[in-house]
């Protein structure tokens, strides 16, 4: 395999793993709150976080530039204080993958957590366990399969992220060209053979992950 | 002393307004489904907040709207056996019972666990999951779990309704034994007249979110206060004839 192909493969894994870790850290608590709490604006939060699932990735990418670009409301401060911009770095690819794949974690996780029998939660409370303990020992373990399915789906989606990544991280060979971007460059420049290898690889990996997600979300106690 | 409940709760299309008091005894909340019996248990346990009122057991106040006291369920010393038992499916019998030992010291926890698993004949199945044991066994596990912390009161929400008749009869006699071994006031919800009569020291009859009659089994079943109570006993004529004949103090 070409060294640039290896680089793309390694970068893709690095980006997908990092963004999936962030998705677990953010997505599971958010899914828990959406499933278990009633607060004003709850559905608005759900909608805003789910939008990247249905918006064209270029629209999501556009919003991300508005936020993280050199003049963006976050990016501006990063540039003023550290003389650094996140644009066109692999971090940008992580942010893009994170935002685009997060809805899969939230949707799957929320559904799984809402399915946990309310009586079991009440039983834990009457047995003296705090909400935090109950979440860790009852609610989350019982929603485990759905949460794992959400993680698997998010990882698969992060691995395949293209549009928002292109907008925010660019397609810089040897820096930000993850596999989907490398496939785009290779096939645009007529290197069908190299592209086909990566296409097959991504397809197999995606199929494998869908299989895992199905397996986890279906098996119940 | 005893458990004192005096609460008002308005819901959409239903309102509960009940006041009753029991001593160290087994009280049965008796009435049709939807009359507010289970809601009362949830309110006592702190799972549903009443609009106003007072709930206290012995010297402890669980809820008092006039003094803005509202203890969270975790701080109310009670054992709750849910209608579907609410055993944790991902835990073994042992883990389920020990989940009820929150706040006990290590020695106390071990002693209580041994005592209860033996008394409830579940010591042979502690490594099984709830899905691997029978309905009657699940029932006993739920009771053991609810009693681990030595609660001041036991709340039973139609715990036998899912069992077939022979098992129900067995569980009723088991509940009788239980009261001798672990004396604790009990509030039992049921709509089964035979069950109520065979277990109750006191019967509190619910209808449409209000208490319409209360007293001993013979007080209520042999002298129903009105048409609504009579309707609840419909179909039990033979059983009632037997029950009320045996009690010479209450002529029919």
Image: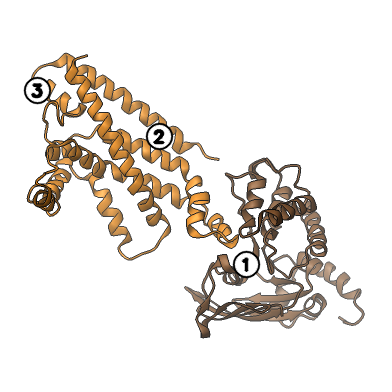
Residue indicated by mark 2: A213
- Position of A146 relative to A214 (above/below): below
The N terminus of chain A lies in quadrant: top left
How many other residues sit within 10 Å of disc 1, few (<14), some (14-19) or many (≥20)? Answer: few
Give the drawing colour for chain B.
brown
Q: How is the image coloured?
A: by chain
Residue indicated by mark 1: B33
The answer to whether any part of residue A43 appears in the image is yes
Q: Residue at x 17, y 24 (%)?
A: A183
Near-viewer residue (B144 or B20): B144
Marks 3/1: CA distance?
Answer: 70 Å
The answer to whether any part of residue B162 appears in the image is no
**Residue B69: where, in percent of width, then height?**
52, 79
Q: Specify which label sits upstream in the sequence, 3 or 2.
A: 3
**Residue B193: where, in percent of width, then height?**
75, 67
In what element is the residue under mark 1? loop
Q: Residue at x 59, y 49 (%)?
A: B88
Q: Are marks 3 and 2 in contact (CB under 8 Å)?
A: no
Q: Which mark is residue B231?
A: none
Marks 2/1: CA distance?
Answer: 42 Å
Provide the chain ID for the residue under circle 2.
A
**Residue B133: where, in percent of width, then height?**
70, 43
Provide the chain ID for the residue under circle 3.
A
Residue indicated by mark 3: A188
- Position of B65 relative to B124 (above/below): below
Picture quarter containing residue A108?
Answer: top left
């Amino acid at each position: 395999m070409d060294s640039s192909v290896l680089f793309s493969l390694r970068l893709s894994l690095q980006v997908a793993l990092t963004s999936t870790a962030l998705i677990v850290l953010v997505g599971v608590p958010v899914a828990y709150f959406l499933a278990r709490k009633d607060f004003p604006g709850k559905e608005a939060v759900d909608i805003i976080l789910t939008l990247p699932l249905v918006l064209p990735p270029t629209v999501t990418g556009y919003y991300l530039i508005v936020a993280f670009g050199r003049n963006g409301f976050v990016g501006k401060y990063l540039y003023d204080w550290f003389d650094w911009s996140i644009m066109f770095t692999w971090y940008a690819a992580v942010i893009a993958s994170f935002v685009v794949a997060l809805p899969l974690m939230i949707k799957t996780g929320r559904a799984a957590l809402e399915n946990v029998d309310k009586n079991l939660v009440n039983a834990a409370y009457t047995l003296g366990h705090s909400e935090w303990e109950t979440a860790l020992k009852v609610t989350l373990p019982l929603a485990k399969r759905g949460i794992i399915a959400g993680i698997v789906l998010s990882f698969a989606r992060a691995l395949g992220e293209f549009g928002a990544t292109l907008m925010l991280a660019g397609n810089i060979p040897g820096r930000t060209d993850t596999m989907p971007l490398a496939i785009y460059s290779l096939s645009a420049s007529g290197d069908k053979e190299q592209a086909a290898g990566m296409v097959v690889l991504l397809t197999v990996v995606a199929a494998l992950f869908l299989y895992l997600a199905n397996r986890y979300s279906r098996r119940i106690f | 002393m005893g458990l004192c409940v005096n609460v008002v709760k308005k819901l959409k299309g239903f309102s509960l307004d009940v006041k009753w008091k029991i001593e160290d005894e087994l009280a049965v909340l008796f009435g049709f489904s939807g009359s507010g019996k289970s809601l009362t248990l949830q309110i006592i346990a702190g799972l549903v907040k009443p609009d106003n009122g007072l709930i206290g057991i012995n010297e402890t106040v669980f809820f008092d709207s006039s003094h803005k006291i509202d203890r969270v369920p975790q701080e109310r010393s009670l054992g709750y056996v849910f209608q579907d038992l609410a055993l944790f499916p991902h835990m073994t019998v042992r883990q389920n019972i020990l989940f009820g030992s929150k706040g006990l010291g290590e020695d106390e926890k071990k002693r209580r666990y041994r005592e209860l698993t033996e008394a409830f004949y579940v010591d042979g199945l502690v490594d099984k999951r709830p899905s691997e044991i029978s309905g009657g066994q699940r029932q006993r596990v739920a009771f053991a779990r609810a009693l681990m912390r030595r609660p001041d009161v036991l709340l039973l929400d139609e715990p036998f309704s899912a069992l077939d008749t022979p098992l129900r009869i067995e569980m009723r006699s088991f509940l009788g034994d239980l009261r001798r071994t672990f004396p604790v006031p009990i509030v039992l919800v049921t709509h089964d007249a035979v069950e109520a009569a065979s277990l109750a020291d006191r019967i509190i009859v619910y209808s449409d979110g209000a208490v319409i009659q209360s007293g001993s089994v013979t007080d209520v079943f042999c002298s129903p206060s009105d048409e609504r109570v009579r309707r609840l006993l419909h179909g039990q004529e033979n059983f009632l004839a037997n029950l009320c004949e045996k009690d010479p103090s209450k002529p029919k």
